[in-house]
Image (cartoon, rainbow, N blue to C red):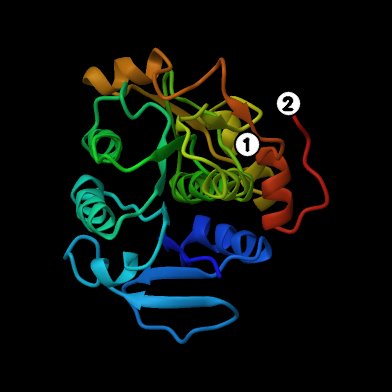
Amino acid sequence: MTTPILVTGGTGTLGGHVVPLLRAAGHEVRILTRHARPRADGVSYVTGDLLKGEGVEAAVAGTETVLHLAGGPKGDDEATRTLVRAASKAGVRHLVHISVVGADRVPLAWMRAKLEAERAIADSGIPWTILRAAQFHDLALTMVKKMSGLPVLPVPGGLRLQPVDSAEVAARLAELALGAPSGPVPDMTGPRLYDMAALARPYLTLRGKRRPALPVRIPGEPGRAYRAGANLTLEGAQVGKRTWEEFLAERLGAVRLPVD
């Protein structure tokens, strides 16, 4: 009998796609979660909190593979260090982590935390795999919804995104988790590049809205990094197939959307 695969963040957007894939491959799954849940269909839950250090050792006990998907606006570095310490003590043989494209190039605090999380894993002595991904369609939709609620649409000059489908990233992560440790693997991005106006346009069309665009400038070093494309991977990435327009059409119930 194989040992369970531990998934942190298993109840989130990405985890919701990954866990069924691991189950379909015949693996028991254990999820570290802040809220107690009953066991169901080969999935068990351990209550704990990475930031508080609660329940982590119990979660990793008896596992050989850990898929670290949990993340937030801050504290990812400390949470990952907590996980690494417990995983090392438990004899984990493969630690798989999802990070973000540009973690080492965009000078923002949350990006630095992502990079420090990567370093904690790489320096852990545990065999590891790290996949950096672009922004998920789900996150892009949240951002566009908020910005489209304003009287004008802010368009940060030089900011471009490569939104990728979370289900496709999940499929890649499941593949990596079931394979051998690979270190840093090619980044994963979406199939098209958008500035903010192009990203918002199909959403506004589906909602029957119009918003005048207001060019804005991202100040300082972050602005220079974004204008230089530091958050992008234009060569050598694994590219997803599902476009932003296809995602919107399905999520918002449209039949089709025009593509610029």
Q: Is residue 16 above or below residue 122?
A: below
- Residue 124 image point, x, y percent: 24, 41
On the image, which quarter does residue 251 sit in? Answer: bottom right
Disc ID at residue 131 = none
Q: Residues within 10 Å of mark 2 (few under 14, many from 20)?
A: few
Q: Amino acid at mark 2?
A: Asp
Q: Mark 1 — residue?
A: 201
Do the residues bearing badges 1 and 2 touch, measured as CB atoms within 8 Å?
A: yes
> What residue is at 51 percent from the left and 68 percent from the top?
29
- Mark 1 and mark 2 lie on one chain; the one further toward the N terminus is 1
Q: Which quadrant: the N terminus?
A: bottom right
Q: Amino acid at mark 1?
A: Arg
Q: Nearer the viewer, residue 161 or 121?
A: 121
- Residue 183 image point, x, y percent: 42, 32
- Residue 13 image point, x, y percent: 51, 59
Q: Residue furthest front?
A: 1
Q: Mark 2 — residue?
A: 260
